[in-house]
Image: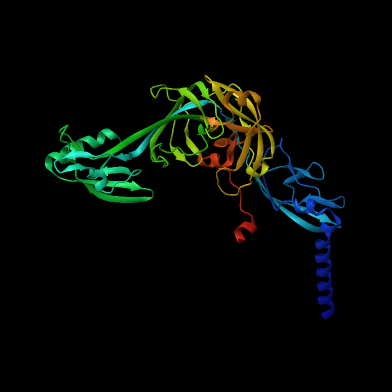
Amino acid sequence: MKDHRRIRFLTGVLLLITVLAVPFFTPVSHYLSVPNQIVAFDDSSAPISVPAIGDNVSVASSDESLQAIDSTEFYAKETGNSELIYEAAGLPIKKVDVSVLEDIKIVPGGQSIGVQLHTLGVLVVGHHQVEGKDGMISPGEDANIQVGDVILKINGEKIKEMEDVKPFVKKAGKNDKPLDITLKRDNETIETTLDPVKDKKEEKYRIGLYIRDSAAGIGTMTFYDPESKNYGALGHVISDMDTQKPIEIHNGSIVRSNVTSIEKGNNGTPGEKQAKFSVDDKKIGNITKNSPFGIFGQLNKPISNGEYDKPMPIALSHEVKEGPAKILTVLDGENVEEFDVKVVSSVPQKNPAKKGMVIQITDEELLNKTGGIVQGMSGSPIIQDGKIIGAVTHVFVNDPTSGYGVHIEWMLQEAGIEVKEEETNEDKAS
């Protein structure tokens, strides 16, 4: 019995020594370059590749779901979880968890779009003084209503637009009764009362607040899904220009936009696309979400960019490489063009996060016309090796040739196009 235990102990020690010794028999950098997990798509045109770590080390699949092409490349026969095992001298020395997801293909954008947002309630963007019988006063400020607050209800009735406010103010003034205000401040709902004051000059009751119920601007379409018609654009949240807070939307729409000129960017001063559109133009889609990763909704019908009109595969964050890439954007009219850029850095991300990439404009034509990344270019899709990898989001103020990009998987998630990675046993245990 003791001999049996001793043999098992010695075998375990020998195995441990073998495992620990392998990195020293092969270049350590090669051994450390092997990932613990790989996520890929069920795409026969894109094999799953793993690093080689030495002539005496082989790689094999733990089951038949991965088919070997050569010593370090495999095709996925089906979706699901599997393993690749590195072996030396017949002993396993490294395990790589492989998750194969259903292939996702989307159509890249690049089109310039006009954006019209309608707020949830009415947004308070400022205070003003009213000259009443007791002197200058701001009723809204006295009611502790702050810039950035959203007025949701007055006297229990929902407020959807600015015109909804006037009848309540007029009635309250005549009846000499305060208004019961329900407002939203960040994530908190607040109740307050406001006493309108009669303006001595205009003989009208005022609340001493500047309010707004809509916002408009331009941006760039990033992608749309040919099956669901769901789209994503901009790559970043739309904030109110006065309050600098994200706009909580009730609804919104997008229309085609025509770029008329470019204001070139310089160090310290970002450039800007000048464009025109009409909110009365035929809408090409709605807006249902304004999130940190852009605006999202559904198109009324497919739209064309004239460059890449067929669905393309996407790359997950860990697949993005430093090096050449391209962006699609508009510099004149509605003409979508392709320009060269460089991915300077990319951070693999397991959870949604902004600014996952740093990109640099390398195209001489684009640099001559814009100076680099300009406002209105946000949302321009980034393409690398035939795959959509993300979207342009921000420019570096002190270096307009460079800026940030967001990985496409997080925009897809916001658009309701799930890119799910099945949990491994290691993930569940943690």
Q: Is residue 10 left or right of residue 365?
A: right
Q: Residue at x 79, y 58 (%)?
A: 93
Q: Quadrant of residue 19?
A: bottom right
Q: Residue furthest bottom?
A: 2
Q: Can residue 90 be seen in the rendering of this structure?
A: no
Location of residue 134 with respect to 8 vertically, above or below: above
**Quadrant including the C terminus:** bottom right
**Quadrant including the N terminus:** bottom right
Location of residue 51 with respect to 253 vertically, above or below: below
Color style of the picture: rainbow
Q: Is residue 321 left or right of residue 54?
A: left
Query: Residue 178, image x and y in percent?
Result: 18, 46
Q: Residue at x 81, y 76 (%)?
A: 5
Query: Residue 226, image x and y in percent?
Result: 55, 30
Q: Quadrant of residue 206?
A: top left
Q: Residue at x 57, y 31 (%)?
A: 373
Q: Is residue 302 left or right of residue 307?
A: left
For the residue pair 179 and 253, the one nearer the viewer reads as 179
Q: Is residue 290 left or right of residue 127?
A: right
For the residue pair 279 and 130, the one nearer the viewer reads as 130
Q: Can residue 175 be seen in the rendering of this structure?
A: yes
Number of callouts in the render? Answer: 0
Q: Residue at x 13, y 41 (%)?
A: 133
For the residue pair 305 and 90, the one nearer the viewer reads as 305
Query: Residue 228, image x and y in percent?
Result: 51, 33
For the residue pair 307 and 335, the one nearer the viewer reads as 335
Query: Residue 176, image x and y in percent?
Result: 13, 43
